[in-house]
Image (cartoon, helix red, strand yellow):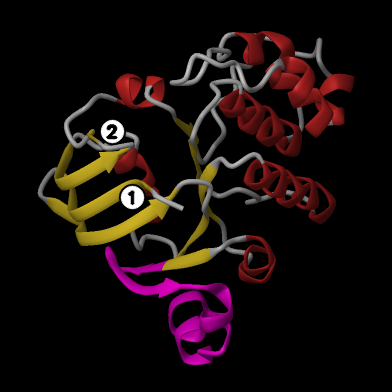
Amino acid sequence: MSDLLTVSGLQSFYGVSQILHGLDFTIKRGEQVALLGRNGMGKSTLLRSLMGIVADRRGSIEYAGRNITREKPETIARGGVAYVPEGRGVFGSLSVVENLIMAQRPGRDGRQAWTIDRVFEVFPRLHQRRMNGGHQLSGGEQQMLTIGRALMTSPELILIDEATEGLAPLIAQDIWRTLGVIRSEGIATVVVDKDFRSLSKIVDRMVMLSKGEIVFNGPPATLAVQPELLERHLGV
């Protein structure tokens, strides 16, 4: 697999506070990567920096061979990167169908890889609730909708922040299953979540952050046999 995303010396700031301290890593095409770490270690800031939402970011971010370090979020999104934010960001006054339609667009290759029907195949529950407003959905249904909305942009890379936070175990299983579908479609994914055991079953690689620096970057099996790292940085 060739590299889709290359990050070199990434530093990110909120005002005078530096959150990320010179990160270096790559994401290959079709690769699924878990981003781990305790609260406040820079995971969300990293995703927001990759998406261009954090304005003060320094270093280099290359996506699909193009430097996007200074590009705006809407330009990055049109280039094939989708973002599922913590808190979901569903439009409550719009129906499920309307939330999906407003996001629909072809990918960089001009192909519309995902349609409403395909999203409903992955999330049958959304089909059942298709005429309901976003504000009428449960937290789990809203997360399904937000992921479905991201897929409607025909992305090559999806950034998912807190994939199953606050969700009931059965709903969380639907999300993990969906990540498997996304992987089978060849879409690269960076996913933040606290469920190390579930993540370790589906991702290719794990990147662990502590105070804005990478303290582990490798396959799940390698991290699983380092209990001191898990305890220190995850409390597992």
On the rendered structure, is 19 left or right of 206?
left
On the rendered structure, is 227 left or right of 202?
left
The image quarter containing residue 51 is: top left
**In the image shown, does 4 or 198 lie closer to the viewer?**
4
Which residue sits at x=66%, y=28%? Answer: 148
Could you tell me the amino acid type at mark 1? Leu
**Residue 212 located within the stretch drawn in magenta:** yes
From the top left corner, tell me how far across and down residue 58 is, in percent: 13, 46
Q: Magenta part of the protein: which range?
A: 208-236
From the top left corner, tell me how far across and down residue 12 is, in percent: 19, 49
Relative to 185, say whether 191 is above or below.
below
Could you tell me the amino acid type at mark 2? Gly
**Residue 115 located within the stretch drawn in magenta:** no
Q: Secondary structure at mark 1?
A: helix
Q: Which mark is residue 52?
A: 2
Q: Which residue is mark 1?
A: 46
